[in-house]
């Protein structure tokens, strides 16, 4: 079902150790980036490297034998991995969400399903499938897109609308005329459709997948409105999306460092002037650094404030509207600003950027593609703006709102 397990004793157990291992992996991931892209999924040895570094266990609590990283610590790890390869970092943060999902299952059931903290879950949360109620559970059918990391996953989580006797099933509390929830299915029961052939983020293996009439026990389903495990900052509806923007930030940092290193050695062919002494190069680098610093600080400031309130036993409702909206807004800004930084540096390097052998080419394609994800779309802006205006968010889960 999945890759060979790294013995638990060899896996780092603290945030500092996992971050250090991620930084050590970055150069190797950079070397393997062409292989990762050609494979259109993470090769088995790369999955094992991530597992051995403790990446997939980041969100599991200590009662699971996990390190229980904060959202800020997880984002730092994701940045470090993305500095080497964006696809590896993307699959890392997606797979690490297993620890988040476990909080919405009965603890005994979750421990049976996820026997160790390195268990990997993939799938699409949006309810595009159909689940027919049957005795003891559901019969799940449908086709889902963007199953990032599904080719090396242990479990697949999928959103679906619920039906009973062929009719839409309403929530008992009347909050939803046609209820949906999440369904967890072993990877072996899922058919993967090999159609991931994209502009960038090629190595994520974000293929479509489908199931037909697969039985899912009731206890293997969950919704983000009901925490069944230990409450805490990660037992929140928005927790699985918080660290994703670390991929964009890591790529932007890599592009900035590459541009500065290049500027220290390159000479303008027309004027014989060193790039380091050229006004346009100096201004471009400085503006990009300013944009990066402001954007990254915005991510960590909003995330830290959110964590502070939740760790003290509060809820997302205890944040001011501005504080609550700041978190999803920072995600969008991080993705889009990182793309803008990479594009400006791509233009700065001109024809040196256009060959596939140039890292700028990969970074440009990767940031362009990742900005098409839901966490970087106008729907997030609408939701935050609507919330600030006491109106209805289209995508309330980005604010931790599930009703």
Image (spheres, rainbow, N blue to C red):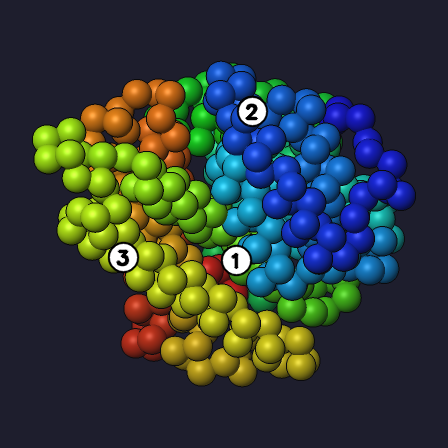
Instruction: Describe residue 154's horizontal placement relative to residue 368 as left or right.
Output: right
> Is 167 in front, or is 100?
100
> Is 321 in front, or is 144?
321
Which circle marks residue 286 in the picture? 3
Crowding near pointer 3: few (<14 within 10 Å), some, many (20+)?
Answer: few
Q: Measure the C-alpha gap from mark 1 to mark 3.
A: 28 Å
- Total labels: the figure holds 3
Which circle marks residue 185 in the picture? none
Q: Mark 1 points at which residue?
A: 242
Residue at 79%, 48% (x, y): give it: 12
Nearer to us of marks 1 and 3 is 3
> Is 209 in front, or is 49?
49
Residue 331 lies, with reference to residue 138, above or below; the image says below
Q: In which quarter of the image is residue 342?
A: top left
Q: Mark 2 points at which residue?
A: 32
Regarding residue 26, the answer to whether it shows in the image is: yes
Nearer to us of marks 2 and 1 is 2
Q: Earlier in the sequence, mark 1 or mark 3?
A: 1
Single out the residue that lies furthest toward the left: 270
Q: Measure the C-alpha gap from mark 3 to mark 2.
A: 30 Å
Crowding near pointer 1: few (<14 within 10 Å), some, many (20+)?
Answer: many
Provide residue 368's location: percent of width, then percent of height. Answer: 32, 38
């Amino acid at each position: 079902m999945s890759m060979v397990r790294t013995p638990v004793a060899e896996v780092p157990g603290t945030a500092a150790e996992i971050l250090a291992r991620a930084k050590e992996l970055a150069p190797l991931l950079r070397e393997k980036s062409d292989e990762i892209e050609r494979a259109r999924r993470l090769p088995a040895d790369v999955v094992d490297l991530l597992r051995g570094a403790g990446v997939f266990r980041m969100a599991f609590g200590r009662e699971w034998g996990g390190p229980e990283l904060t959202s800020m610590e997880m984002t730092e790890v994701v940045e470090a991995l993305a500095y080497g390869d964006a696809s590896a970092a993307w699959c890392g943060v997606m797979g690490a969400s297993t620890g988040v999902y476990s909080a919405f299952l009965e603890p005994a059931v979750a421990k049976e399903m996820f026997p160790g903290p390195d268990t990997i879950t993939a799938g699409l949360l949006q309810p595009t499938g159909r689940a027919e109620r049957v005795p003891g559970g559901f019969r799940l059918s449908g086709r889902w897109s963007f199953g990032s990391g599904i080719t090396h996953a242990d479990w697949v989580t999928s959103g679906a609308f619920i039906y009973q006797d062929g009719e839409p099933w309403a929530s008992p509390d009347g909050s939803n005329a046609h209820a949906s929830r999440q369904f967890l299915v072993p990877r072996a029961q899922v058919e993967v459709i090999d159609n991931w052939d994209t502009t960038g983020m090629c190595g994520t293996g974000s293929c479509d997948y489908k199931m037909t009439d697969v039985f899912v026990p009731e206890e293997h389903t969950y919704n983000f409105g009901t925490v069944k495990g230990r409450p805490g900052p990660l037992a929140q509806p928005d927790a699985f999306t918080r660290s994703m923007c670390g991929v964009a930030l890591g790529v932007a940092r890599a592009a900035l460092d590459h541009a500065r290193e290049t500027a220290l050695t390159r000479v303008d062919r027309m004027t014989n002037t060193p790039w380091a002494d050229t006004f346009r190069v100096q201004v471009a680098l400085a503006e990009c650094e300013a944009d990066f610093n402001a954007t990254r600080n915005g991510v960590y400031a909003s995330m830290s404030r959110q964590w502070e309130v939740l760790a003290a036993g509060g809820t997302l409702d205890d944040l001011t509207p501005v504080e609550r909206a700041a978190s999803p807004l920072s995600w969008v800004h991080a993705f889009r600003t990182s793309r803008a930084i990479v594009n400006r540096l791509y233009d700065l390097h001109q024809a040196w950027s256009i060959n596939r052998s140039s890292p700028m080419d990969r970074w440009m394609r990767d940031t362009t593609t990742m900005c098409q994800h839901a966490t970087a779309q106008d729907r997030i802006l609408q939701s935050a703006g609507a919330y600030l205006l006491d109106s209805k968010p289209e995508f309330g889960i980005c604010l931790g709102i599930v009703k």
